[in-house]
Amino acid sequence: PVSESFDIAVIGAGPAGAVAAALLLRQGFSVCVLEKQHFPRFVIGESLLPHCMEFLDEAGFLPALHAEPSFQHKNGAAFTWRDRYTHFDFTDKFSAGPGTTFQVRRDRFDHILIREAAKQGADVRFGCEVCAFDNTGEHARLNVLPEHGAAYALTARFVLDASGYGRVLPRLLDLDTPSALPVREAHFTHIDDHITAADFDRDKILISTHSTRRDVWLWLIPFADGRSSIGVVGLPERFIGQDSETALKNAVANVPMLQRILADAVWDNGVPFRRIGGYSANVKALHGKHFALLGNAAEFLDPVFSSGVTIAMHSAKLAADLLGKHLRGKAADWQREFAEPLMVGVETFRTYVNGWYDGRFQDVIYAPSRNADISRMIASVLAGYAWDTENPFVDKAERRLNALAQMVGRQDGD
Ligand code: FAD
């Protein structure tokens, strides 16, 4: 085809792209979503946070999600270290908003979202890779390389880059800048968990801390069909000479609770062991002429608090609202109305991610007792309400975390 034209072109059909597309369609704009792969496709990131339900609701996606039987109801986060076990209940939290969400296979979840966006009117093109971007003209111009057929140009009044780990515009526009977080890696797979232990709560993600290396941790994310996602995260030097299967099984053997509840688990079920590394990323700017960056295409911190999809959808919502104003010719300040508000939540999560790895937040989590009000404030952050500045653990995150860590003292696990 010759040059085609849309109000908005979205690069990438993951959660950020699907939510942005739906919210913009609802405002009456024409939206084209360009996706390099074919769905369903694998992507990691299976535990959602309740805050993202607000965006899924507004996008009209919830009925389709509730109909998928493998999605696991989730109402909190549990933590274990040595013989300690504690949990946060997301339905008993400081901030207003939903208190439950899902744990999902991302191939199914992402496929449902983009299918719903297409039903709502998005022109979704799979097998179409965006390989060039030109913002020198009155409209943005993308070069699209379809899997079959010739490359073509597409123009849009505005481009949202939701390409996740593809980081299309940061690469093309040289916006990449190193993350301040050290380069960690994850080894993971899916198992038939066969968990019957009465003290295991299937409605919560279980985060485990390695008994002696507190910067190494594991996730256990149960689904509703007897399967679980399991993974270990740490610095590469923690896994030297180990393939992903060995790294993961060694880590599980180190955690008493996991060893016990997974005694009957079936690992060898045809699902590969996978590795991903160097995933933390940052950018010099979140927006520029005719474009803005969403979700993982912008900044990705760390998987420990399952914040990735929620941040991605929060960025999609902020961008869709502002883009509505922008395309209707009203004043739109992308720094003040998009980048700065988005960073409020990102900075909150950054504080707790740093506090997790340097031990302060783990000391708070694993302390033998906890004040109920403080639990509710922390539960809010862990449920994704990291933008609620009414919450002192958001507004003064660093100060509150330091004070609390000092009060509980260093936990030695004995
Ligand atoms: P993605 O979901 O990555 O989608 C981007 C899409 O863009 C892809 O489909 C890709 O094919 C497409 N694309 C790429 N390049 C191009 C191109 N040139 N042209 C067209 N299309 C293109 N998050 C959570 O919320 N919960 C978790 O439990 C969690 N666990 C994680 C565990 C690990 C080990 C890691 C590394 C991350 C985890 N995350 C988690 C983060 C999560 O993976 C991401 O934050 C989330 O997928 C971001 O969504 P997105 O829409 O920005 O991008």
Image (cartoon, rainbow, N blue to C red):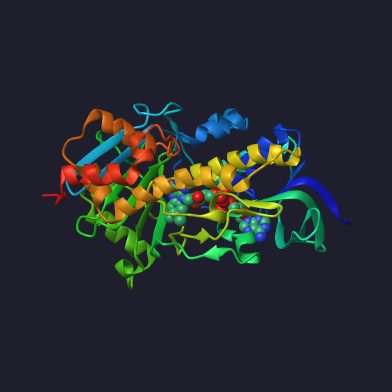
- Image quadrant assignment for residue 148: bottom right
Kindly identify the residue that appears in the image at 70 percent across and 32 percent down. Answer: 26
- Asked whether 208 or 413 is in front, the reply is 413
Whether residue 359 is visible, yes or no, is: yes
Q: Where is residue 352 in the image (x, y as percent from the top left)?
A: 34, 48
- Asked whether 115 or 141 is in front, the reply is 141
Which residue reaches farthest right? 2
- Asked whether 194 or 274 is in front, the reply is 274
Q: Where is residue 308 in the image (x, y as percent from the top left)?
A: 48, 48
- Image quadrant assignment for residue 322: top right
Kindly identify the residue that appears in the image at 60 percent across and 30 percent down. Answer: 58
Q: So how many labels did they put on this image?
A: 0
Q: Is residue 85 left or right of residue 16?
A: left
Q: Where is residue 133 in the image (x, y as percent from the top left)?
A: 73, 61
Q: Is residue 281 left or right of residue 35?
A: left
Split into 4 quadrants, where in the image is the N terminus? bottom right
- Asked whether 361 or 80 is in front, the reply is 361
Whether residue 117 is visible, yes or no, is: no
Kindly identify the residue that appears in the image at 80 percent across and 46 percent down. Answer: 6
Q: Is residue 360 left or right of residue 350?
A: left
Q: Where is residue 25 in the image (x, y as percent from the top left)?
A: 72, 36
Which residue reaches farthest bottom? 241
Which residue reaches farthest left? 414
- Image quadrant assignment for residue 242: bottom left
Please determine whether, in this image, residue 183 is positioned above or below residue 413. below
